[in-house]
Structure formats: structure tokens, C-alpha cells
Amino acid sequence: MDAATIIESESRELIRRRGLDVRADQLEPLIREVVADYEHRSAKGEVPVLRDADTMVAEVAARIGGFGPLQEMLDDPEIEEIWLNSPLLRA
């Protein structure tokens, strides 16, 4: 499994254990907590190395509380339209 998948899974589990609603003000600190634990395990060689913690926090937050890979485009004020094809069509 890649780092993002591991961190997302562990973040979702922590949300369930704590009985939290997924709100933006709670989500980022929780993911940062999971990322810190992940980096500690990574230093021991237990999981793959994480390249950029801040990018990972944003990516996992978008996966859990946002619109996944679309979130970055939705947040960009320069982007006016997003066109989606059928899931069967690949560019």
C-alpha cells in the first residue's frame, strides 16, 4: 500500500474510534496526528517514506472530507469549468 492509502485508512479508523463528524476544523489536526505517527514508523523502516507531510495532509483531507482528486481544482479560482467523461472513457 502507498503512504496516502495507509494514512487515509488510519485517519478514517481514528475518526470512527473517536466518534467524530468529518468537519474541516477537526479533520486537519486529526490527519496531522496520523501523519506524525506515520513519520515515526517510517523512520523505523516500517512503512514507506513520506515525501511531503503538508501535501499528504491536504490530499487525505480531500479524500475524506472533500471531493478527492477534484478538490484541488474546485479550490483553484482560475478554474471555471470541470468536465467529466464516463468512467469507461480514459484520456
Image (cartoon, rainbow, N blue to C red):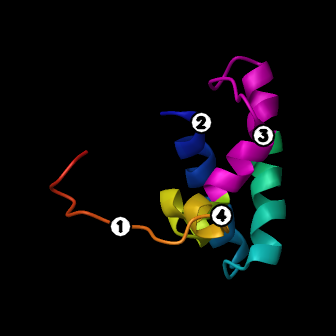
Whole-percent x, y for residue 10 in the image: 62, 52
State how far apart marks 4 and 1 are (Cα): 15 Å
Residue 53: mark: 3
Question: Reading the chain from its start, which is encountered first: label 4 or label 3?
Answer: 3
Query: What amino acid type is highlighted by mark number 2?
Result: Ala
Query: What amino acid type is highlighted by mark number 3?
Result: Ala
* Of the two numbered discs 4 and 3 in the rendering, the one whose residue sits closer to the viewer: 4
SS class of the residue under badge 2?
helix
Query: What amino acid type is highlighted by mark number 1?
Result: Trp
The residue at which mark 4 appears reads as 76
* Residue 83 lies in the magenta-colored region: no
The magenta stretch spans which residues? 37-60
The residue at which mark 1 appears reads as 83
Question: Reading the chain from its start, which is encountered first: label 2 or label 3?
Answer: 2
Q: Residues within 10 Å of mark 2 (few under 14, many from 20)?
A: some
Using the image, determine if residue 49 lies above or below residue 7: above
State how far apart marks 1 and 3 are (Cα): 30 Å
Question: Reading the chain from its start, which is encountered first: label 4 or label 1?
Answer: 4
Q: Residues within 10 Å of mark 3 (few under 14, many from 20)?
A: some
The residue at which mark 2 appears reads as 3
State how far apart marks 2 and 4 are (Cα): 25 Å
